[in-house]
Image (cartoon, helix red, strand yellow):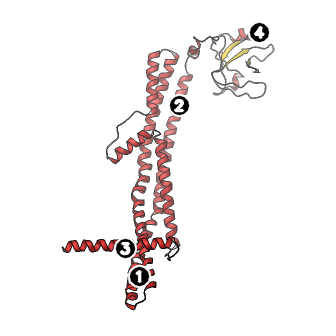
Amino acid sequence: MNIMDFNVKKLAADAGTFLSRAVQFTEEKLGQAEKTELDAHLENLLSKAECTKIWTEKIMKQTEVLLQPNPNARIEEFVYEKLDRKAPSRINNPELLGQYMIDAGTEFGPGTAYGNALIKCGETQKRIGTADRELIQTSALNFLTPLRNFIEGDYKTIAKERKLLQNKRLDLDAAKTRLRKAKAAETKSSSEQELRITQSEFDRQAEITRLLLEGISSTHAHHLRCLNDFVEAQMTYYAQCYQYMLDLQKQLGSFPSNYLSNNNQTSGTPVPYALSNAIGPSAQASPGSLVITCPPNLNDLKESSNSRKARVLYDYDAANSTELSLLADEVITVFSVVGMDSDWLMGERGNQKGK
């Protein structure tokens, strides 16, 4: 019975406190009661914490989208994380594309131009997929996890203490209101005692909340180090991808000339022939200069007035208005002009014409 009486009394006291806070809050909203304002420093700390929480959530969620664009995969990873289990390993998009390319190249024949190129491209895509997997793992460990720990740990503690501070403030203001309304000396004395207690509890909670909020600066410093780790991981990833593609480009560019015309053998357009000469002075040729295909004997073409079809191997930007800018893989018409420099041919594409 004593325990039951204690529980009933505690329940009644809690209900009374809740009702008092509700009345005070409502009267404040209606402008019928005064409100104790927090000091400017504490208000600034609260604003800084709220701002940190909002932007940390946005950055964290968008980073997750960047690293894993598939929403279903993100949900699955979230569920496994909450169950404290390791998510099953799955093949990523670059690795899947690479495997398709390798399988296709194998079926077409590694000895063909297209099959050989597909296999090389597939191997490169799989290497990119491995680098992508390493980026996700490193970023999750060094960047996403600290951000998530702040949202689910530190900020939850701050929010809890902030709510407690709000309740202590409502108790304080309610005590002030009761003191102002007290008329009898005994009631006034009791209200003053209550005010001293609520003021002490409010000051203590304000100090606890302030100490927690001042830790936000340390959080920013920690997140800055995590951001540097994320940038370094991205830098490593993109450098790897660039090197992989550079190596692939060199491998594809080293194919024999008969490979370059392999894909045109079944088309209805004239089949171009390989030529090692670059359009433009050979002394000025660069890795980005234009190479086209034409008859095996360049002199035969120069000495005749006939025109031939040629396929562009590399992009070329015209140096002046007398030259013709071209894009790789397009087919143009080439012919010689009497009196033209021996290092040049004329090219024609539609209404455009130039050296």
Q: Which residue is mark 4?
A: 305
Query: Is the residue under label 1 in contact with that under label 3 (CB below 8 Å)?
Result: no
- Residue 298 picture location, percent across and down: 69, 12
Under mark 1, the amino acid is Leu
Q: Tell me the element at label 2.
A: helix
Q: Which residue is mark 2?
A: 245
> Which label was assigned to residue 127?
none
Residue in the picture at 56% in, 14% down = 262
Q: In front here: 152 or 223?
A: 152
4 or 3: tag closer to the N-terminus:
3
Q: Marks 1 and 4, Cα distance to the nearest angstrom?
A: 108 Å
Q: Which residue is mark 1?
A: 195
- Residue 139 picture location, percent across and down: 44, 45
Q: Which residue is mark 3?
A: 17
Q: In front here: 85 or 288?
A: 85
Image quadrant where one finds the N terminus: bottom left
Residue in the picture at 40% in, 90% down = 184
Q: Residues within 10 Å of mark 1 (few under 14, many from 20)?
A: many
In the depicted structure, whether residue 216 falls above or below residue 253? below
Under mark 2, the amino acid is Met
Q: Marks 2 and 3, Cα distance to the nearest angstrom?
A: 69 Å
Q: Tell me the element at label 3.
A: helix
Side of 190 relative to 10 (left or right): right
- Residue 341 picture location, percent across and down: 77, 18
Side of 114 relative to 355 (left or right): left
Q: Marks 1 and 2, Cα distance to the nearest angstrom?
A: 73 Å
3 or 1: tag closer to the N-terminus:
3
